[in-house]
Amino acid sequence: MAHASFEYRYLAIRGLRQNLTDTDAHNLVGVLAASLVLSWQAPSSDEYSHTMQGVKTVLEFMDANDYRSDLRSLLASSDELPRTRNTDFTLPDCPLVRANEVLSTILKRLQGFQVDAEFKRSMKELSNYVSSLAMRRVTNTPAEYQMQALYPIRNWMEWIPNAFQRLTQGDPVVMLFFACFEMTHLAIAPILPATSTPLSILKRAKIIENLDKQITDLEQSSRLSASIDAEQLQTLGVLKALMAGPRSWISTRVV
């Protein structure tokens, strides 16, 4: 399985490099999406860094040529954290501690509910990662060390490409996971400043806000539907309630 994974990754990267010569706007959006997926699945911090540098290069080319797309609008430079006086969002105090509290609460609450094992495992991995990072002093370390500290959050994410399909189908489990995933990245941003990626702090906060709205709308519409049973409705209500954890990261507005 590992051999096949490396082989297909090699083929994907080779195809990606071949397509870099085609500067058509639609082709570059495909290159951008493929690069992001490859970065998530990078087997080492060095390869992740190189792939993200490629993402940055594509973004700069698209900006220089005024290419627009939904994916491009989601991505932005995040070389430094936004100053709170210039924005309506600020990170909470002790972000790792706060993130761990949210994740621990969600894990405990879900113990008695029937949600897929992959989701529970992923939530546990997020919690373990945050707990481990909180015990390490990495903020003022070299960039290479910070990149290595970021690697574990990607090492178990093979299911995420499929999760995007579930997200488009309105799966509330995946909505909650992605909200927690983005919350975790918000928490580690000031801890690992050298690992800044094209997805900005404010964009991650906006994603959480959008996911919260989606699961709220889904829960409200489901209550009016005759095709959902009481147990499913109860689980959906619990998932919506648990979204309060990630949502608390975006509820503090700066005047």
Image (cartoon, grey):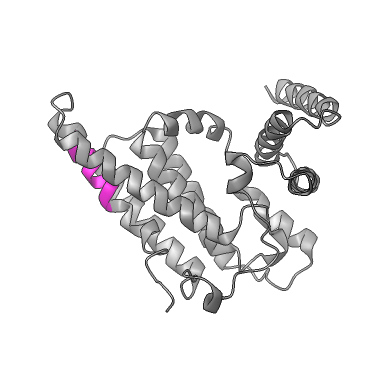
Left-right relation of 222 to 172 = left
Q: Residue at x 34, y 43 (%)?
A: 214
Tell me the quarter of the image containing the N terminus. top right
Give the vertical position of 175 relative to 203 (above or below).
Answer: above
- In this rendering, the count of numbered labels is 0
**Of residues 63 and 126, the one drawn nearer to the viewer in this rendering:** 63
Q: Which residues are magenta?
A: 233-241
Give the vertical position of 107 relative to 136 (above or below).
Answer: above
**Does residue 155 appear in this view?**
no
Tell me the quarter of the image containing the C terminus. bottom left
Q: Quadrant of residue 148?
A: bottom right
**Of residues 133 and 212, the one drawn nearer to the viewer in this rendering:** 212
Q: Position of residue 205 (x, y in %)?
A: 48, 58
**Does residue 149 appear in this view?**
yes
- Secondary structure mainly formed by the magenta segment: helix
Give the vertical position of 95 relative to 85 (above or below).
Answer: above
Q: Position of residue 126 (x, y in %)?
A: 50, 51
Determine if the magenta segment contains residue 240.
yes
Q: Residue at x 64, y 44 (%)?
A: 72
Q: Residue at x 69, y 29 (%)?
A: 26
Left-right relation of 142 to 187 = right
Left-right relation of 58 to 104 = right
Q: Position of residue 101 (x, y in %)?
A: 39, 63
Determine if the magenta segment contains residue 132.
no
**Of residues 1 and 36, the one drawn nearer to the viewer in this rendering:** 36
| Outermost residue toward the front in this view | 66
Q: Position of residue 130 (x, y in %)?
A: 52, 59
Q: Residue at x 57, y 40 (%)?
A: 70
